[in-house]
Amino acid sequence: MKRIFPALCALLLLTACGPELPPEDSDRLQIVAAVFPAYDFARSAAGELADVTLLLPPGAESHSYEPTPADILRVQRCDLFIYLGGESDAWVDAILSAIEPEGEVLRMVDCVDLLEEETAEGMQGGHDHGEDHDHLGEVLSMDEHVWTAPRNAAAVTRIIGERLAALDPVHAGEYIGGAGDYARELEELDRDFAAFFAGLPDRTIVFGDRFPLLYFARAYDLDYYAAFPGCGTQTEPSAATVAFLTEKVREEGLSTVWYIEFSNHLVADGIAEAAGVGTARFHTCHNVSRAELEAGETYLSLMRANLEALREHM
Ligand SMILES: [Zn+2]
């Protein structure tokens, strides 16, 4: 341990008789992923060769999670810690300010070209990551939901493969091969989305929900409208926002108002009812439910299901 904090000492005492951790002398690579997309990409590269742990529990809201003492120890001891980066995961920053990881770290936002957070026309408020962001003239922060574009997912996967290869050169070919196989499937997914959207006369999509899909929307040149930007904490849109989105659905002749996973979809339901159309779910892969995790769902399978839902509803 490079730095000693009283709080961390307390945590260490707590964990001494607490959760199970992998033995420190394990010769298998220990990879810890903060969020589901990182976990999914890492396990594709690791195959059976390394242990990949997901910190964020299934079903948890990814930006407001409170890490446990065991989480902190896992991050400190692992060979590679993969997290999103950006401003929103304050719990990851809290871990990294409490300890210094003994292994390497990889930020997904460093793997691809970033986009600035956007507030689309009609959207409620704007920029709600963190506490007080309403200062005039403030520079918008970068949007960190990079994995929502499959080509970005492929790029991150290949980089993880290279990092694992460097950490465990004996198995370099297997890590790069595993990552490459998955990345090629993700690139095929990207081509399938592109082909689907290319065949549509109108690429307008309305989300009665938060919209962590800026990279996805840009990848396929979609015109999107949503109740809230990114992953804000807002849940109550103004009457003006609801009216705007309802009018958009009518004007564009859309058949569906979209909502995202773990949403109560009340806003989407309200807009859909007012416009006389239906609703459907788009899974942003931000996190998965316990049932999804146990069923072996992957980023690829969830995004393939999104493509099917789009085919059905657009
Ligand atoms: Zn988010």
Image (tube, rainbow, N blue to C red):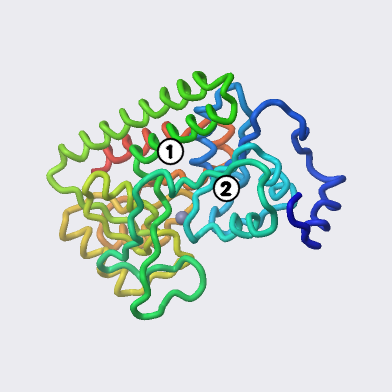
Question: Residue placed at 82% from the left, 51% from the top?
Answer: 12
**What SS does tag 2 mark?**
loop
Question: Residue placed at 34% from the left, 43% from the top?
Answer: 149
**What SS does tag 1 mark?**
helix
Q: Position of residue 124 (x, y in %)?
A: 35, 70
Q: 278 or 192, which lies in front?
A: 192
Against 304, is 146 above or below?
below
Amino acid type of disc 1? Val
Question: Residue placed at 26% from the left, 31% from the top?
Answer: 192
Against 8, is 301 above or below?
above
Q: Position of residue 128 (x, y in %)?
A: 44, 68
The quadrant where residue 8 appears:
bottom right
Q: In whole angstroms, how far apart are the C-alphas of marks 2 and 1?
A: 23 Å
User: How many numbered discs?
Assistant: 2
Q: Which residue is mark 2?
A: 59
The quadrant where residue 58 appears:
top right
| Mark 2 closeness class: few <14, some 14–19, many ≥20 residues within 10 Å | some
Q: Which residue is mark 1?
A: 156
Q: 293 or 119, which lies in front?
A: 119
